[in-house]
Image: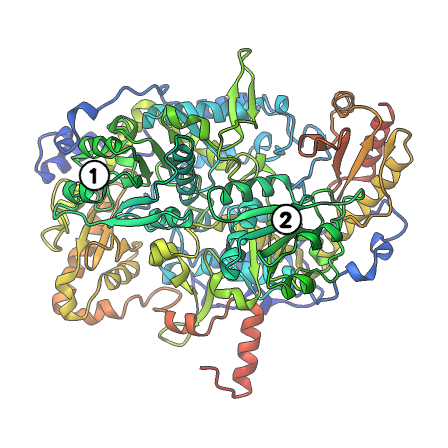
Amino acid sequence: MHFHPLTDADKDEMLKEIGVSGFNDLLQGIPSVLRHPKLDIPAGLSEFEVQNLLKERLGLNQSQSDLLSFLGGGSYDHFIPSAVAQIISRNEFYTAYTPYQPEASQGTLQTIFEYQSLISELTGLDVANASHYDGATAVAEAVLLALRHTGRSKILVSSSLHPHYRQTIRTYLKGTPYIMQEFAFDENGQFSREDFMKHLDPQVGGAIFQTPNFFGVVENLMGVSESLHEAGALLIMASHPLSLSVFKSPGEWGADVAVGEGQPLGLTTQYGGPYLGYFAVARSLMRKIPGRLVGITQDSKGRRAYVLTLKAREQDIRRERASSNICTNQALCALTACVYMTLMGTLGIREVAEINLDRAYYLRAEISKLPGFHVNVNLPIFNEFVVRSDKPFARISEILKSHLILPGINLDEFYPEMKNHFLVCATETKTKGDLDRYVEALSQC
Amino acid sequence: MLISTDSRTSFEKSKPGRRGATLTSSRCLDYQPVQKISESLLRKQVLLFPELTEPEAVRHFVSLSKKNYSIDTQFYPLGSCTMKYNPKVNEWAAGLDKFSALHPFQPEETVQGMLSIFYDLEQYLKTITGMDAFTLQPAAGAHGELTGIMLVRAYHNATGQGHRSKVLVPDSSHGTNPASAALFGYRVVELKTNDRGRVDLEVLLENLDDDTACLMLTNPNTLGLFEEDILEITKQVHSKGALLYYDGANLNPLLGIARPGDMGFDIVHLNLHKTFSTPHGGGGPGSGPVGVKKRLIPFLPLPVLEKTAAGKFTWNKDAPQSIGRVKSFYGNAGMLLRAYVYIRSLGLEGILKCSEGAIVNANYLRKKLKKYFPVAIDETCMHEFVLTLKFATNKGIHAGDIGKRLLELGFHAPTVHFPLVVEEALMIEPTETESKETLDEFIEAMIAIAREIEEDPKVILDAPRNLPIARPDEVLAARKPILSYRDLVREKALQSDGVSVS
């Protein structure tokens, strides 16, 4: 086995040194009834056999390279510069451990510091952590933060928050004294201000708004942070990170916490993970933020040094009194996002958002011209929007399949009242030709 | 110079107008949509990103990478972290377009290959651990623990035992164990381990009652010792109606040798980034699949992967007793794929070589080092063992200092000051992918350090001298947190104004 360097001679010599006559002597502490179970594992394969197996297995898939995809809904097909994959493939990055030894981890630590800085810029909030598992878990941890911080029992979420995020929050709160309540959205998919205010009572510790929301609609949050703060509650916001170079940042809306899915920042869609959750807070919540933080300090010679800091919040020190049980973050994914944002720069990060707007607005306008398909062309969106069809979505999906197109996400799976509604996403990776091909295929339905 | 001394951030290397990526200039519309959007929705805040060309950015990050130790460049005897080699074919597989370009909302019929891999991986993990079912959802070990604790609660609630409010953990456990239990309102009781570093049956029985929800255990424990009374422990815990949770962080030495399922554990989490060779990535992404015994299957998180009679794979999103969804989509798929590739590469024979190599390497190191450093519990160990540096404290030397000296000598430090039950602990886990030659070099270095403790402690206390930084001032970092580039700019401005910020 080419990963295991001990030769038989090595082993014999080492066992002799240890003072035992054979390997099994080292297992004496294990009750004999437990020892050497029969495992049902196939025989090992050589590397090229493994490669053939993988090609065969994965060959059964059709990916977004084979199909023209208009899928979004929390995972997006964005352009990724080639340099990103090259850099994160540096062995010194991807085979390093958590940077517990700062002297031997300045590379990882500095990139996390830069990542924190970039997330802080995007969200307009002071302090970003080193990343969380993904959008859903980051949102769920933000809920716990808000409820613990305020000592309240209720969290409000808009029903237009990503269904997976709501489901995850529900899981995290099950069996705790905390509850989640949803407030409604209107016929345009925008949150209902009236219903929100109706739910806002003295038990509310925070409210979560997603913008653009799950339907792709950019929300107007005028007055929301004021209402929440007046009620002693926190505003938590979740956004597509690339939208934030154009649309008002969580900081500008007065948010206390900004969390969300970081996958659009240079990560492939890779069947849903690994992604990363970004997590930023206002300075007043700095000591409540879960997960790792990297800060700048000096070494004993007065040179700049990057270190993990404010560790007193964490499980390895605080154990049952920690602010969260999180241990590892998604460091390599945070590095990916950091490299992506650095390559994009101030100009590129704005331009990519503008191209998303161009593609989505164009596609929506073209679909609006098709008989049998309905969209609201007046809503502010970023890169996705809802289409209502007169025909069943299953049929549209079937027809578009023959055109090698994935038309979008069926919404009635998540909102049973939204029969034949689907969510369509167009990012900068789509050309005008792609969009026209999609509209042409829809017109044949 | 091989390693740059430049510690400037990308922001400090920026020049306005530069960029590192090109996008298209083609537009579909003859107007800019932002002009149609209400001003009140648009960002006015300045967005300060670094501006670098591609070659500048690449040089920036590549020179940063050289400031890291990694398993591909150094020996990493980091106890409980299982820093084994990450086979490159794993990375090759994860880079394939037929995986990386899969969207999680694609119709099931377009991802059957992927799902077949998940399904097979579940079967392999089941047979390796002796459990009846697995979920691949949890994103990391700690996330697996959280899922496990949710399963405990769901099971007790469903069986009319919702009053159980206590979780027992040994005082040698990983910090995530008590943290995960406490996060969901359980009262955590720490069990003092006996003088052989194991669960003390008497202490266990004193604390075990009808209020106990579960016992969380690592086996082998963090001292690298197998819990010899494990069958009695699980019997006692079950007799009180409580469950047993297995923290799989230390599974590596048991591969093919013993199974937590056979020991009587009800719930198991694995760390694919430890035992199953997926890269640590500088601190994630991990992956923490959870396995359960039959009676807990109805509570597993959603969605649940199923194989139909026709041999098709499908996600079941509707199991009435499930704890629900624990994250978006389907777990850290990229890590699951790598673990699958690893298991197929090793096969049964290779898997047995892992545990054998891990145990032989650890005992060899222990035996060689014990002449120079006391071993906390000097018995046959499994994959790791713990040295104590208590004897050196009168020279002003602590376990952490040995770690720093090792860094200087080109080895990553062992885990220091953990487990908490050993004073001045140095926890060493070599893994099976290290050669005898590497271990011998490490032994030589440790022998030299033992001599230095006696003869020249200063050389240890001043280490490291040959790395990008010397020891950092962690107190300053926490007292005056600089957590972003903006913080740094503010701090610099204050300094140049002569304002004291201490």
Residue that mark 1 sits on: B382
Numbered mark located on residue A377 in the image: none
Residue B155 visible here: yes
Cα separation between marks 2 and 1: 49 Å
Residue at 40 percent across and 36 percent down: it is B87
Q: Chain of mark 2?
A: A
Residue B122 rendering spot, x and y as whole percentages: 43, 26
Amino acid type at circle 1 is Met
Q: Position of residue B278 (x, y in %)?
A: 42, 39
Q: Which disc is residue A157 wearing?
A: 2
Image quarter of the N terminus of chain A? top left
Report the side of A256 relative to B456 (left or right). right
Q: Is residue B157 left or right of residue B247?
A: right
Marked residue chain, label 1: B
Q: Residue at x 80, y 42 (%)?
A: A187
Res. A47 in view: no
- Depth check: A411 or B20 in front? A411
Give the secondary structure at mark 1: loop
Q: Between B355 and A82, which is closer to the camera in this rendering?
A: B355
Label 2 SS: strand
**How crowded is the residue under tag 2: few (<14 C-alpha within 10 Å), some, or many (20+)?**
many
Residue reaching furthest top?
Answer: B310
Q: Which kind of residue does numbered mark 2 sit on?
A: Val
Q: Quadrant of residue B207?
A: top left
